[in-house]
Amino acid sequence: MPNGAGMTDDIDQLLIAALMEDSRRSLKALAQISGLSSPSVAERLRRLEERGVLKGYTVEIDPKCFGYQLQAIVRIRPLPGQLQNVERQIQAIAEFTECDKVTGDDCFIARLHVRSMEQLDTLLDRLNSYAETNTAIVKKTPVKRRLPPMA
């Protein structure tokens, strides 16, 4: 069980939800949302960070602004004896923005951003001697990355 699991109260959860919505919220804004003073909010955030509940604050970008017009989900099944080579290849290809090692026939499920179908083919060709791939182009994301229920 993670360090901070099960040790948050309603105010902590309210602060976390507010930060998930906008990680740039000021202590003053978080204080208004929670009904606490700014120093109390700062102390709660410090404790959440120390316990590993809050692991960082981040910026979300739109890959399309950088020319990445396509997003794909790639299921990757390494050929016998190629698991480590596949993992190294995935890590070396910067267009893979996320990858999970999973159970089942496919050892990896990865998210990939590319500028064109040609680029997708070129990148997947780098895996061909190590793995079989199955690719699905993302049309829409009805559920963006979000927290599971905290209670």
Image (cartoon, helix red, strand yellow):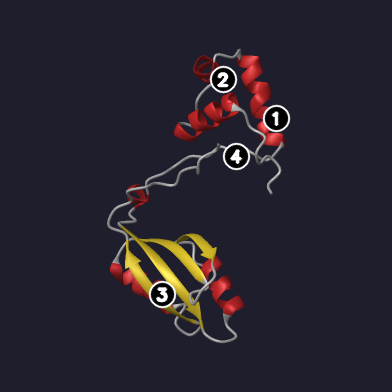
Image disc number at residue 124 = 3
Spot occupied by residue 41 in the image (x, y as percentages of width and height): 62, 20
Residue type at mark 4: give it. Gly
Tag shown at residue 56? 4
Frontmost of labels 4 and 3 is: 4
Percent coordinates x, y for residue 60 in the rendering: 44, 42
For numbered disc 3, what is the local secondary structure? helix
| Location of residue 36 (image quadrant) | top right
| Disc with the residue nearer the chain's start (2 vs 1) | 2
Horizontal relation, residue 63 to residue 29: left or right: left
Residue at the spot 58% in from the left edge and 72% down from the top edge: 88
Q: Which tag, 3 or 2, sits closer to the chain's start?
A: 2
Q: Which residue is under mark 2?
A: 27
Q: Amino acid at mark 3?
A: Leu
Task: Determine whether 119 is above or below 16 in the image.
Answer: below
Residue visible at 66% across and 41% down?
5
Position of 116 compared to 43: left or right? left
Which amino acid does the dot numbered 2 rest on? Leu
